[in-house]
Image (cartoon, rainbow, N blue to C red):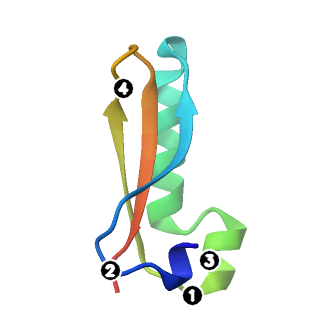
Amino acid sequence: MLAFAESGKWFIDKVYDRAKRKAARVAARDLCTGKIAAVRKSGLHIDSRVLPTVDGRFAVEIARTA
């Protein structure tokens, strides 16, 4: 899905519970740095961010940058 999306369009990758804020931040960092094998092998340049949801959980969003 991300490979065919236009550059800069954000998608939710995963949603974490309130107590897992640190895990969400680590997942977002790992996506950007290429520590996730599927992302690294795809050759896509990805940007990620963590945003709070309305119900207090944390969503990791990803977007293709190039």
Tell me the residue at 42%/50% (across/down). 61
Q: Amino acid at mark 1?
A: Gly
Contact between marks 2 and 3 (CB within 8 A): the answer is no
Q: Residues within 10 Å of mark 3 (few under 14, many from 20)?
A: some
Residue 66 lies, with reference to residue 27, above or below; the image says below
Contact between marks 2 and 4 (CB within 8 A): the answer is no
Disc 2 to disc 3, C-alpha distance: 17 Å
Q: Is residue 25 left or right of residue 30?
A: left
Residue 7 is labelled as: 2
Estimate the x, y position of residue 4 in percent, counting from the top left: 51, 84
Disc 1 to disc 2, C-alpha distance: 14 Å
Q: Which residue is mark 3?
A: 40
Disc 3 to disc 4, C-alpha distance: 28 Å
Estimate the x, y position of residue 32 in percent, counting from the top left: 44, 63
Disc 1 to disc 4, C-alpha distance: 29 Å
Q: Which comes before the other along the chain, label 2 or label 3? A: 2
Q: Residues within 10 Å of mark 1 (few under 14, many from 20)?
A: few
* Quadrant (top left/top right/bottom left/bottom right) for the C terminus: bottom left
Contact between marks 3 and 1 (CB within 8 A): the answer is no
Q: Residue furthest left?
A: 8
Q: Which comes before the other along the chain, label 3 or label 4? A: 3
Residue 43 is labelled as: 1
Tell me the residue at 47%/65% (across/down). 33
Q: Amino acid at mark 4?
A: Thr
Q: Amino acid at mark 2?
A: Ser
Residue 53 is labelled as: 4
Element type where label 4 sits in the image: loop
Element type where label 3 sits in the image: helix
Estimate the x, y position of residue 16 in percent, counting from the top left: 55, 27
Element type where label 2 sits in the image: loop
